[in-house]
Image (cartoon, rainbow, N blue to C red):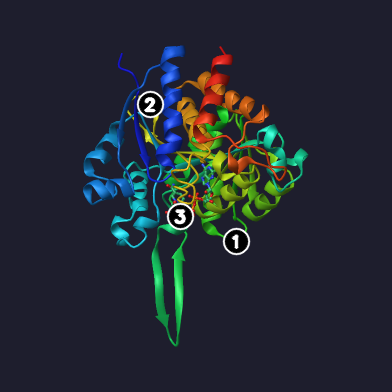
């Protein structure tokens, strides 16, 4: 059987630097675990614009559609700030998300014990935290019509429309329940059914999908404003949270920051199942191209490494190997290895991007 295919789009700025460490881990998987991927690489973002005049070519788009998973570094940078909106680096990423129809955005908030003091919350509130926010990504108020700024009498009025169809809600709910089954089997759905009709429909459809197909998963519902409070009060009460595009945007940033540095945060965006039954998928760190530190060997590669771990779990059914990578990261942090973004006020000597990669590889070796 052919090896599973992985398209790597390292992108701009620190993208290629953090991706280099992931490529070493992919090599390790082959050499030490006999797990091989059919890896190809291509351009996205500013580097694609430099080479082809567009941030994503049709050929690269086709490769992404055909791959079992896409792993992206980051796009953008000051060099491209003045470009026309239609060819800005971010448009490459948006095109991938749109054309692959990636409707389910998974944002884990996981707090490694060694970094618990990095959170703005108390250690006991965040230590050991491991939750995932599933955000609907392709519909809702960011896309609904009518939208625009219109004149009404003597003043202007800004309009956006929250709109969800049953099928859009059902598919993201299904994605959350499937995820919960691979974790602690608990889903909390968040909306504002008290004041929004789209929230009433959201609640009803999530409940219907649950009762029909996922009765074994524990389901609760919460108003999103209360959800925000509960996330800060006692986040460990949650396992999987599923919510719409707008609430998910806000709640996932809030949850992610419970855990400390941007350099630690992975994400996955999943679409409909492909012929092999697995979802179309794009994995990427939450951070951007960090032009302020690009080319200096200072970038933390962990967010990108953990994004690859998510790919192992959700695209390649290699949950044990995903856990192995996550445990290696945990060990490295427990041993006190820190890139500059993870240095506490006490100082110390930070390691470089490559040295962090070396440490993760050594921890992987030690796991055998
Ligand atoms: P950013 O995430 O690139 O950087 C924010 C801050 O966090 C910077 O100080 C940076 O040095 C630091 N940081 C980020 N990742 C880090 C890492 N792995 N290790 C250590 N420190 C890290 O956000 P920004 O500065 O607002 O944006 C810079 C560029 O990236 C812009 O062009 C923006 O459009 C683009 N961007 C791209 C993505 C993406 O590709 N998904 C996401 C956000 C921003």
Q: Real-space Cα distance between discs 3 and 1?
A: 16 Å
Residue 159 lies, in percent from the top left, at 45, 70
Q: As drawn, is 83 to the left or to the right of 77?
A: left
Residue 311 lies, in percent from the top left, at 45, 29
Between circles 3 and 1, the one closer to the viewer is 3
Q: Give the mark nearest the N terminus, 3 or 1.
A: 3
Crowd band around label 1 with a 10 angstrom C-alpha radius: few (<14), some (14–19), many (20+) = few
Residue 100 lies, in percent from the top left, at 34, 41
Q: Real-space Cα distance between discs 2 and 3?
A: 26 Å
Residue lying at 45% horizontally and 88% vertically, measured from the top left: 154
Residue identified by numbered label 1: 195
- Looking at the picture, does residue 74 appear above or below residue 276? below
Q: In terms of secondary structure, where does tag 3 sit?
A: helix
| Quadrant assignment, res 239 | top right
Crowd band around label 3 with a 10 angstrom C-alpha radius: few (<14), some (14–19), many (20+) = many
Q: Nearer the viewer, residue 150 or 62?
A: 62
- CB at disc 2 and ligand 1 closer than 8 Å: no
Residue lying at 47% horizontally and 49% vertically, measured from the top left: 290
| Quadrant assignment, res 171 | top left
Q: In terms of secondary structure, where does tag 1 sit?
A: loop
Residue lying at 52% horizontally and 41% vertically, measured from the top left: 298
* Residue at the bottom extreme, as displayed: 154
Q: Nearer the viewer, residue 279 or 86?
A: 86
Residue 40 lies, in percent from the top left, at 30, 29
Residue identified by numbered label 3: 140
Q: As drawn, is 263 to the left or to the right of 70?
A: right
Q: Nearer the viewer, residue 205 or 84?
A: 84
Q: Give the mark nearest the N terminus, 2 or 3.
A: 3
Residue identified by numbered label 2: 277
């Amino acid at each position: 059987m052919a090896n599973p295919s992985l398209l790597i789009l390292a992108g701009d700025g620190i993208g290629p630097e953090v991706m280099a460490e992931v490529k070493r881990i992919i090599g390790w998987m082959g050499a030490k675990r006999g797990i091989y991927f059919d890896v190809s690489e291509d351009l996205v973002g500013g580097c694609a614009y430099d080479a082809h005049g567009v941030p994503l070519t049709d050929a690269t788009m086709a490769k992404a559609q055909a791959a079992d998973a896409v792993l992206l570094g980051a796009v953008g940078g000051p060099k491209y700030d003045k470009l026309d909106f239609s060819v800005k680096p971010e448009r490459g990423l948006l095109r991938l998300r749109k054309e692959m129809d990636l409707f389910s955005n998974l944002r884990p908030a996981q707090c490694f014990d060694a970094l618990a003091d990095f959170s703005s919350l108390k250690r006991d509130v965040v230590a050991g935290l491991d939750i995932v926010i599933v955000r609907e990504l392709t519909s809702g108020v960011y896309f609904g019509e009518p939208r625009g700024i219109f004149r009404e009498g003597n003043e202007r009025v800004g309009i956006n429309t929250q709109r969800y169809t049953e099928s859009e809600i059902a598919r993201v709910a299904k994605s959350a329940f499937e995820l919960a089954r691979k974790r602690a089997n608990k889903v909390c759905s968040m909306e504002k059914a008290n004041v929004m009709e789209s929230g009433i429909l959201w609640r009803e459809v999530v409940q219907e999908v649950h009762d029909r197909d996922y009765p074994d998963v524990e389901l609760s519902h919460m108003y999103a404003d209360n959800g925000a409070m509960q996330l800060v009060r006692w986040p460990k009460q949650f396992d999987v949270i599923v919510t719409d595009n707008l609430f998910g945007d806000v709640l996932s940033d809030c949850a992610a920051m419970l855990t400390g540095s941007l350099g630690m945060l992975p994400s996955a965006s999943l679409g409909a199942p492909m012929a092999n039954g697995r979802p179309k998928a794009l994995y990427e760190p939450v951070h951007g191209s960090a032009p302020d530190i690009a080319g200096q060997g200072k970038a933390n590669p962990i967010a990108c490494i953990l994004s690859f771990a998510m790919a192992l779990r959700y695209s390649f059914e290699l949950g044990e190997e995903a856990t192995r990578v996550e445990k290696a990261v945990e060990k490295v942090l427990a041993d006190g290895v820190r890139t500059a973004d993870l240095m506490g006020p006490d100082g110390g000597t930070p390691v470089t991007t490559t040295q962090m990669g070396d440490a993760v590889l050594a921890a992987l070796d030690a796991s055998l």
